Structure formats: structure tokens, C-alpha cells
């Protein structure tokens, strides 16, 4: 087929993956998209404290200054280009399907979905862990289980009411949860001693490189998650790159400025730098009132993280149903809110099932599966650059192909390092979930061939971008 014909077939909003774009009456604007991406990636400085404990102030500061350039920016650039070239719901699943076919597209979907839901399950637990400081009865037993259940259901219902509502809720949550860090940074200015920033840690405290690397990785990934909602975005070709740039600046400044303020304003007590220590710093710098506000902000940030993560997971499932990877029912939308109710329900039920488990190895498994997906995503990006050279790209990374290879290679090496330090349990669980995804792919293909279950489209037809039945 001629390049011009290929371009027509793959023009944004033309074709099966754009079905949800045409059916969605309300679109997500720039500001709520910025904060949804912000909560997908960060949600605020909460959680960066461990980098100081692991390696000291200097390396923590350098990490949050340098890591975005070798990890966050490449991922955001790849996301901006592919999300605007193929702006349908499903995001990275569409890209991998276009590059390598339905098997790898399906496997990508399962990897990213498992990773997202594992993270999703931890957020209500974290909320209750903060609330139990005020209501001790929620620490254990039936009250704890019921509180986790009802908080999960309530948070999921908010997602059910519509992506626009979720987006503007994210804006409000983002502003309120960031304000205590703005105040902390301003109040700290007279107390800052820049020499404290140069500390490599206290004598006798051993560097924990695994914790250091995982903390940076955990706080600065998931830039591609919002791509699964591209079909719901107003003018995605223009809006998505702007949103990624804005949320990138907000995220990086939101990490580095409070870190500089906190490490510079108080003497180093490295062992105390654990999750939640920012609240103690706030009390030392400004008083108990700021500590309380910061703890409230932590809960609100967790709510924002849950809503953003659930949105991306649900619209990924919706996109996979549109592509024919999952049964038609997963692509159904609620009549009143136009939201993918079945996808939201499925993600919520799985999150509830996992919410009372031990998360140490499981969360590490989520990171491992995410890393597998990112390696495949970078490979897909390079393949699509070669495969569709003449395709119109509303946003295009201004580099030649050799430079793009280097841009993708650097974060890929980092991903391999993160995967290499995983435990044996993580390898076993990841292998099991990957095998489950493969078996499910072939089982669903059998269901499709036998007409046992209804599907929206034929993945095989959609795969053939050279002109046959696309």
C-alpha cells in the first residue's frame, strides 16, 4: 500500500480505536489533564524521604535533579508522540499492537493492568493507615477491613461519575495537598544552611542503593498511564503535549524545592528520613499546625493517586475491549455518566481482593511488570518510527533515528537494573502473572473463534495496517 493510503488509515480519530472518541460527549480539558498526569506520576513530595535515608541529602538532591532527564523526559516524549499519533483509548496497548501485533499488544495490556491494579490496592490501605492515627480502632480486625472496603467503594464511585469530575477533583486535591509544602519551603528560607545539602550521609550509616534507586523510580514513572484516556481528551494532538510539559514541571519542582528546603533547614538525622517524615520537619520548622495540614494533604494526595490510577486502568480496559482483546462487556459505558462501568468494577474488585495482602513483594512485582511493559513500549516506539515514516505526527520528537535509539536505550538500561535487583519471589510471581496473561490471550481467541463470547472487533483485522480489512 502507498504511504499516503497508510497515512489515511492511521490518521488520528480514524478507525476502530477511535470509536470511544466519537461516543464521548464530554472531553477532558488541559488543566484537569495536567493534574491527572501529576497524580499518575507523583501526587506530591510524599514518599521521596526514603532517598535521603538511603544515600544522604546530596545524592537525594542529585537524584531528583538528574533522574528526570534520563528517565522521565524520554518516557514523556515517547508518550507525547505516540498518544497524538494514535489518540485512542488504550494508549500503549494500541502502540504495541500496531508495532508487533495482537499477541504482544495483549501481553502489554496485561502487564500494565496488573501493575496498575497492584498499585491501586495499596492506596485505600495507606489512607486508613493515616486515619488510624486519629481513630485507633481502625488499626486491625473487622473495623480495618470494613474501612478499607468502604473507602475503596466510595473512591471508585467518584470515578464512576465521570472523567471530567475526576479531573477537576484532581485539580482541587493537587492544590490543597501541595500548599503545605509551599508554606514549608517559604518558612524554611531563613533557616537554610546550604552546606547541609553537600552531606553524603551520617558516619556509620550504610548506603542502600536498592532503596535509593527504587525510590527515584517509584516517584518518577507512569508518564504513559494517561495515554489510555487519549480518546477522552479535548483536541488530544494539541492538549496532550502541553499537559505532559506542564505536569512535568509541576512534578519536578514539587519534588526538588521541598527537598532542598527540608534538608537545608534542619540538622541531618538520616535514620528518621522515612515515609511521612516531611510532617515532622514541618512541625520542627513551623509548628504543629503545618504538620496536621501536611498529614491531611497526604490523605488527599492518596485519594488523587487512587482516582488517577483507576481512571487510566479503566480506560485501558475499555480500549482493549474496543480493540477486541477483551469481551464486549468491558467496553460498555454507563448511561448517565458515559464512564466504562464494567472496567471500573473489574479494577475495583481485583483491588479489593488484594487490599488485605502483604504488599512488600507484590508492589515490587508491580514495578517489575511495569518495567517489562516499558521495555516493550520503547521497542514499539522505535519500530513505529521505522514502520510509518510518512505518518503525520502532530507532535514529533525532533531527533534522528540514531539519537532516538540512544534516548530509549538509556532508560532501558535503568529498567534492566531495577529488574535485576528484584527478589526471587518477584520473579516467580511475575512469571506466573505473565503466564496467566498468555493463557488468557489464547483462551479469549478460542472464545472468539467459537463465538462463545461477544467481542467488538477482530484484532487480526486491526493488526493488518498494510491495507487488509483495517
Image (tube, helix red, strand yellow):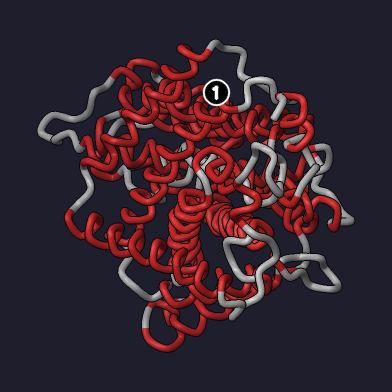
Q: Outermost residue, left direction?
A: 204
Q: As drawn, is 22 to the left or to the right of 442? A: right
> Can you give x and y, in whole percent of width and height, for residue 302 in the image?
54, 57
Residue 396 coordinates in the image, percent (x, y)? 66, 21
Q: Residue at x 32, y 41 (%)?
A: 214
Residue in the image at 73% along x and 70% along y: 332
Residue farthest to the bottom, as pictured: 142
Question: Which of the two residues, 87 or 249, is positioned nearer the viewer here?
Answer: 87
Of residues 193 and 88, the one drawn nearer to the viewer in this rendering: 88
Q: How many marks?
A: 1
Q: Residue 223 lies in what quarter of the image?
A: top right
Residue 92 place in picture, x, y as percent:
57, 44
- Expressed as whole percent of the image width and height from the top left, the position of residue 423 reads 19, 52
> In the image as oriented, which residue stretches furthest toward the right?
25
Q: Quadrant of residue 209?
A: top left
Name the side, left or right, on which 242 lies relative to 277: right
Residue for badge 1? 386
Q: Is residue 308 visible?
A: no
User: Dividing the image into 4 quarters, which one contains the N terminus?
Assistant: top right
Q: Is residue 204 above or below residue 161?
A: above
Q: Is residue 205 in view from this perspective?
A: yes
**Residue at horizontal 47 percent and vertical 50 percent from the top:** 108
x 13%, y 29%: residue: 203
Which quarter of the figure has residue 246?
top right
| Label 1 CA crowd tier, 10 Å (few <14, some 14–19, many 20+) | few
Query: Viewed as shown, does residue 370 lie left or right of 386?
Result: left
Query: Which residue is more in the foreground, 85 or 14?
Result: 14
Mark 1 lies on a secondary structure that is helix
Amino acid at each position: 500500500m502507498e504511504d499516503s493510503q497508510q497515512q489515511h488509515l492511521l490518521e488520528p480519530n480514524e478507525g476502530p480505536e477511535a470509536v470511544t472518541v466519537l461516543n464521548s460527549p464530554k472531553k477532558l480539558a488541559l488543566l484537569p489533564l495536567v493534574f491527572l498526569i501529576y497524580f499518575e506520576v507523583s501526587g506530591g513530595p510524599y514518599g521521596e524521604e526514603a532517598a535521603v535515608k538511603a544515600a544522604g541529602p546530596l545524592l537525594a538532591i542529585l537524584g531528583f535533579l538528574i533522574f528526570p532527564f534520563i528517565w522521565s523526559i524520554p518516557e514523556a516524549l515517547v508518550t507525547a508522540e505516540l498518544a497524538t499519533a494514535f489518540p485512542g483509548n488504550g494508549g500503549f496497548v494500541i502502540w504495541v499492537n500496531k508495532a508487533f501485533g495482537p499477541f504482544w499488544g495483549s501481553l502489554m495490556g496485561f502487564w500494565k493492568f496488573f501493575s496498575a491494579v497492584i498499585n491501586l490496592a495499596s492506596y485505600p490501605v495507606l489512607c486508613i493507615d493515616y486515619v488510624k492515627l486519629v481513630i485507633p480502632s481502625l488499626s486491625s480486625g473487622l473495623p480495618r477491613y470494613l474501612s478499607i472496603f468502604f473507602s475503596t467503594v466510595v473512591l471508585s464511585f467518584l470515578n464512576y461519575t465521570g472523567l471530567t469530575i475526576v479531573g477537576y477533583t484532581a485539580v482541587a486535591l493537587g492544590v490543597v495537598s501541595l500548599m503545605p509544602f509551599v508554606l514549608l519551603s517559604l518558612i524554611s528560607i531563613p533557616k537554610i544552611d546550604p552546606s547541609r545539602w553537600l552531606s553524603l550521609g551520617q558516619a556509620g550509616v550504610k548506603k542502600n542503593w536498592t532503596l535509593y534507586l527504587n525510590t527515584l523510580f517509584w516517584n518518577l514513572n507512569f508518564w504513559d498511564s494517561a495515554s489510555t484516556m487519549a480518546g477522552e481528551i479535548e483536541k488530544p494532538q494539541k492538549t496532550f503535549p502541553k499537559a505532559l510539559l506542564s505536569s512535568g514541571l509541576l512534578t519536578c519542582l514539587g519534588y526538588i524545592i521541598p527537598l532542598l528546603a527540608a534538608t537545608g533547614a534542619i540538622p541531618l538525622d538520616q535514620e528518621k528520613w522515612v515515609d511521612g517524615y516531611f510532617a515532622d520537619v514541618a512541625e520542627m520548622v513551623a509548628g504543629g499546625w503545618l504538620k496536621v495540614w501536611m498529614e491531611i494533604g497526604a490523605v488527599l494526595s492518596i485519594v488523587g493517586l487512587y482516582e488517577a490510577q483507576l481512571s487510566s486502568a479503566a480506560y485501558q480496559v475499555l480500549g482493549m475491549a474496543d480493540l477486541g482483546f477483551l469481551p464486549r462487556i468491558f467496553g460498555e459505558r454507563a448511561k448517565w455518566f458515559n464512564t466504562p462501568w464494567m472496567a471500573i468494577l473489574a479494577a475495583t474488585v481485583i483491588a479489593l481482593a488484594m487490599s488485605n495482602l502483604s504488599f512488600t513483594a507484590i508492589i515490587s512485582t508491580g514495578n517489575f511488570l511495569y518495567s517489562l511493559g516499558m521495555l516493550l513500549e520503547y521497542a514499539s516506539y522505535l519500530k513505529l518510527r521505522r514502520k510509518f515514516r510518512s505518518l503525520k505526527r502532530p507532535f514529533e520528537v525532533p531527533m534522528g533515528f540514531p539519537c532516538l535509539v540512544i534516548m530509549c536505550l538509556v532508560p532501558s538500561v535503568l529498567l534492566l537494573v531495577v529488574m535485576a535487583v528484584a527478589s526471587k519471589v518477584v520473579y516467580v510471581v511475575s512469571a506466573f502473572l505473565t503466564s496467566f496473561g498468555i493463557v488468557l490471550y489464547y483462551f479469549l481467541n478460542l472464545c472468539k473463534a467459537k463465538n462463545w463470547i461477544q467481542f467488538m472487533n477482530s484484532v487480526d483485522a486491526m493488526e493488518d495496517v498494510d491495507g487488509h480489512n483495517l
